Amino acid sequence: MAKPSDAKEIANLHWSVRERYKEGIFLSMGKDFLASYYKLTLNDPWEVVVCAVNEEGRIVGFTETTLDAKCKYKNVRSHKLYLGWIVLKALLRRPYLTKAVWQRYRSLDENNSGPKFFNVEGVRGAFWCWSKSDDSLKSYEMVKVKNDILRAVGIKEYRFEVDKQNKAVYKFHLKVNKAEPIEEIKLPDGRVRVVMRKRL
C-alpha cells in the first residue's frame, strides 16, 4: 500500500509514461499538478493505492481506487485553493487549456450539472500505471492484489473508465480483466469514454 510520502515518486512515475496516451487534461497540467494530486490522494482515507516495488525499493507501478467517489471529489473540492494555484500556474503556460479545465472542474459539481467525464458515485477505479523499464505483465498481478484487498473489505464490484480509442487497454479489460462495458460517455472534445464494471 502506498504511503503519503510516496506521492512524489508516484507522480514521477505517472509523468514518465505520459507519451503512452496523451489525450485528456490531467497530464497537460504538468508534473507539479500530479505531485499535488497524489499528495492529496494519499492522505485521503477513502483511497486504496497499491504499489509494486522492485528489488531496489523503487516503485515501478501503482493502481488507484477510491472506496467512495462522492467523498473523494468532495475532498478535492475542499482543496480547490490548493489545487487551483497549481492549475493557474499551468494555465499561464498553456492558456488554451482554460476551457477544458473549467469543464473538468464543473464535472465535480455535487448536483451533476456539469459535463460528465467519469463515475462520481460508489467504488471507482482510477489510475493504473506501470514503468516502461519493467515487465508489464506483472502489472496485472498488482491489479489482482488490489482486487483481493477490495474483496477483503467487502467490495463486490467497482467501476472505472477507459477511452475507446485507447484500444489496447480497452481490449485488455474486455478479454483479460473480464470487465463489462455498461455506459458510453461522449466527452466535450469528442472522445468516447466507456464506463466498465468489474465484479469481484
Image (spheres, helix red, strand yellow):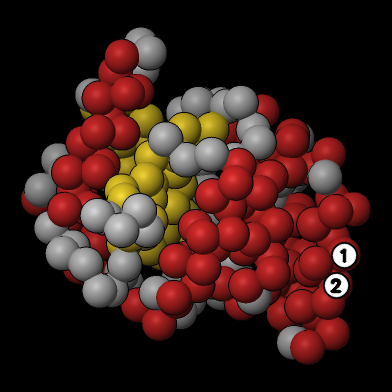
Horizontally, residue 20 falls left or right of residue 78, namely left
Residue position for label 2: 88
**Which residue: 64% across, 61% down?**
35
Residue 112 visible somewhere in the drawing: no
> Alpha-carbon neighbours of circle 1 within 10 Å: few (<14), some, or many (≥20)?
few
Q: Residue at x 18, y 48 (%)?
A: 140
- Residue 189 placed where, x, y %? 56, 74
Crowding near the residue tagged with mark 2, few <14, some 14–19, many ≥20 C-alpha atoms within 10 Å: some
Give the image location of residue 155, x and y in percent.
Answer: 36, 17
Residue at which label 1 appears: 85
- Asked which secondary structure carries label 1, the reply is helix
Q: Position of residue 127 (x, y in %)?
A: 44, 52
**Where residue 132 appears, x then y in whole percent?**
28, 74
Q: Where does the C terminus fall, quadrant-wise?
A: top left
Which residue is the extreme one toward the front?
Answer: 56
Q: Amino acid at mark 1?
A: Trp
Q: Which circle marks residue 193 in the picture? A: none
Give the mark count. Answer: 2
Q: Amino acid at mark 2?
A: Leu
> Which residue is depicted at the point 21% across and 36% down?
144
- Please say whether residue 126 is visible from this viewpoint: yes
117 vs 17, nearest the viewer: 17
Q: Are marks 1 and 2 in contact (CB under 8 Å)?
A: yes
**Label 1 – label 2 distance at C-alpha:** 5 Å
- Which quarter shows the N terminus? top left
Image quadrant where residue 60 sits:
bottom left
Query: In the shown orientation, is residue 18 left or right of residue 79?
Result: left
In the image, what residue occupies the spot 50% across and 72% down?
Answer: 15
Vertical side of 122 occupied by 25: above or below = below
Q: Please determine whether, in this image, residue 21 is positioned above or below residue 103.
A: below
